[in-house]
Image (cartoon, grey):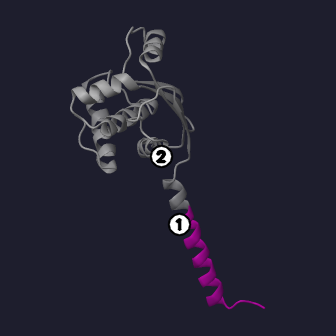
Amino acid sequence: MIDSPQRTQRAQRKLESENSASSASSAVKKRLHLSVQYASNDDRLPSRPKVRRWVRAAAATDVEVTVRFVDSDEGRTLNRDYRRKDYATNILSFPYASEPSVVGDLVVCLPVVLHEAGEQNKPCDAHFAHLIVHGMLHLQGYDHETGVQDAERMEAKEREILAALGYPDPY
């Protein structure tokens, strides 16, 4: 059976519409390969779904990332070996690739984060979210240590992402 021109045009428009919608949704949807490792133990550690939500919110492109929660000894060793700073810090970012997708590791030092949250009177959950977003931005090339404008740009992006997640301004 041969389709009428109107039927063919309707089918063509429907196909174009489906392809357009598919393209739009694939442009928005980012691939995420996430591994969360708990080398430290505490009831205040964020769950894997929370970490996934924070990583996804901060990702501007496809990402493959490992987030590892560590104790002070491991955090100090990594900071000393890779940054030549002999103390545990809240988060370390290890970027491996940025094209075509972001590949890297984030190492979160649990005791430092818990201490900072208490000291700053912040909920642990909000502080973890901030640091994961902060680390993800580092993996994507943001750097607050290269100048005032870069720091302001990074902090503005952090605020934007955290507000979209429902968290208050971390600064």
Label 2 packing within 10 angstroms: few (<14), some (14-19), many (20+): few
Foreground residue among 107 and 119: 119
Q: Position of residue 148 (x, y in %)?
A: 25, 25
Q: Which quadrant is the C terminus positioned in?
A: top left
Q: CA distance from mark 2 to mark 1?
A: 28 Å
Q: Position of residue 1 (x, y in %)?
A: 78, 91
| Residue 98 visible in the picture | no
Residue type, numbered disc 2: Pro
Residue position marked by numbered label 2 in the rendering:
49
Left/right placement of residue 85 relative to residue 14 reads left
Magenta stretch bounds = 1-22
In the rendered image of this protein, does residue 80 appear above or below residue 98?
A: above
**Is 149 contained in the magenta span?**
no
In the rendered image of this protein, does residue 116 appear above or below residue 17?
A: above
Residue position marked by numbered label 1 in the rendering:
21
Q: Main secondary structure of the magenta part?
A: helix
Tell me the number on the disc at residue 9.
Answer: none
Q: Secondary structure at mark 2?
A: helix
In terms of image quadrants, where is residue 120? Answer: top left
**Is 17 contained in the magenta span?**
yes
Q: Position of residue 163 (x, y in %)?
A: 28, 47
Task: Please name the residue shown 37% across and 23% down the image.
Answer: 111
Task: Please name the residue shown 55% across and 72% down the image.
Answer: 17
